[in-house]
Amino acid sequence: MLKLFNTLTRSKEDFIPIDGKNVLMYSCGPTVYNFQHIGNLRTFFFEDILFRVLKYNDYNVRYVMNITDVGHLVSDQDVGEDKMEKSAKQLGKSVWEIADYYTEIFKRDISLMNIFPPDVYSKATDFIQEQIDLIKCLEAKGYTYQISDGIYFDTSKFPDYGKLAKLDISGLKEGSRIEFSQEKRNITDFALWKFSPENEQRQMEWDSPWGRGFPGWHIECSAMSKALLGNHFDIHCGGIDHIPIHHTNEIAQSEACNGEKFVNYWLHGEFLDMGNEKMSKSSGKFITLQTLMDKGYSPMHYRYFLLMAHYKKKLKFTYEALDAAKSGYNNLSGKILNLRKNPPSEKTLPVSERMKNFENRFLDRINDDLNMPEAMSVLWDMLKDEDLNQDEKYFLALDFDRVFGLGLENLRSDINEEVIPEDIQILIEKRKEAKKNKDFKSADEIRNSIREKGYDILDTKDGTQIKKLN
């Protein structure tokens, strides 16, 4: 039986879907105003592990992830600029160009990380009418009020507000330093629809029954999950930073409108720390996947690093720890490649009692709230077991990798070679083009540039080879 830690009840529960073997799952995706840092990718990795474990348990999963391209303000208290509009001004591009660019980078990064994409990416700007309709529903039921900058949800009208985060609302009122609009009735009230500034035309704004403007950040997930998964579904997940405000507000507005329970299981992944502080785009202190690749690490080295900690445990990032993960991954890859030297002639293999024992141990670990460190221990124990033959070990390793997602079935024999930085790869392609055009002078100049960057390029009968200079 799969057990998951439900943030709503603060307990580990048996997972029982609403509809038999069919699972409806929603996760909060990126706000596409900047690159996603490796801390963000830890959250998407955890959700990928959840998806893989569900599939491993033979569930049919419909998976939706939102793309926030409007309405996420720089402050969670509904003040300040829209993150998308601010980024567009800084970079001198349109909001739509910013959204498309960073969305594609995000999709590239999760592909490199071997993270399964959702069945549906739902963009907030594609669901404006659905968001307006949800606000109208809340208005008709008496949950909204209007102030100078928009339409707000009155949290005092929703008795269970704060149940996800276990909020002490009276304590917030007494001691909070949260920036608080004097027009708001309650400190926890939040914007459903924001009016466009009178002295400024936004790039993203729409007409509504209340005036021209744009939706608040929280309303998009309630509207899109309702449209794509229904009023009541199985799993909603995201980072722990979403618990006190974003997910709390989703529950309030969804249950207030729909009159029924919103989500059965809430799962949240812990932060990745850089030193002693949380990695954050707002602070400017963050590392991207491309940063790691430029330093010679493979995305699979980072994935292996993430597998070393439970998703609910805070994980400290250091390059020393990543080096250890790189070594572990390369060691594992070498063992799998050795097992594959004489591949089994059959695609299936009779399951021996010894194999069944490891399968059961593995299933027990992954079904214990996605315990990846313990599951990895089972993998290593299996590879060291002298009572299993090579074929059995190979089949089990590939079976376990359906959850780990380390790409063990598609390993290359050169897996231990260094990952070539993107700028070097670009120079290599330029040199190929120069040679193709018989511009040998330029080709030699590019080769010298590559050497200055610490790499040597060799032309062989099998093609171009690149190696790092000592």
Image: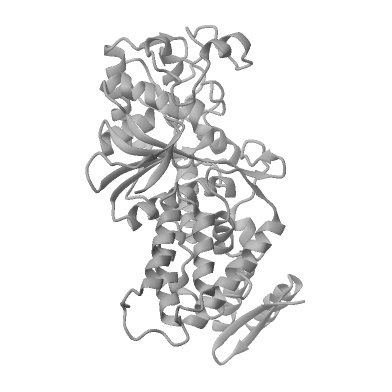
Q: Measuring 54% from the left and 68% from the top, which residue is drawn there?
A: 380
Q: Measuring 58% from the left and 65% from the top, which residue is drawn there?
A: 298
180 or 242, nearer to the observer: 242
190 or 457, nearer to the observer: 190
Q: Is residue 117 visible?
A: no
Indicate the position of residue 346 as horizontal and vertical percent values: 31, 83
Task: Indicate the quadrant where residue 286 lies.
Answer: top right
Q: Measuring 42% from the left and 55% from the top, which residue is drawn there?
A: 364
Task: Indicate the quadrant where residue 3 lies.
Answer: top left
Q: Measuring 65% from the left and 66% from the top, which residue is drawn there?
A: 296
Indicate the position of residue 466 as horizontal and vertical percent values: 64, 79
70 or 243, nearer to the observer: 243
Q: Is residue 289 above or below residue 135?
A: below
Residue lying furthest left: 19
124 or 280, nearer to the observer: 280
Colour pattern: one colour
Indicate the position of residue 71 as horizontal and vertical percent values: 45, 29
**Quick one: quadrant of the C terminus?**
bottom right
Task: Indicate the quadrant where residue 226 lies.
Answer: top left
Count of numbered circles on the image = 0
Residue lying furthest bottom: 461
Q: Is residue 187 above or below residue 44?
A: above
Q: Is residue 33 above or below residue 359?
A: above
Q: Is residue 75 left or right of residue 392?
A: right
Q: Is residue 312 left or right of residue 163?
A: right
Q: Is residue 402 visible?
A: yes
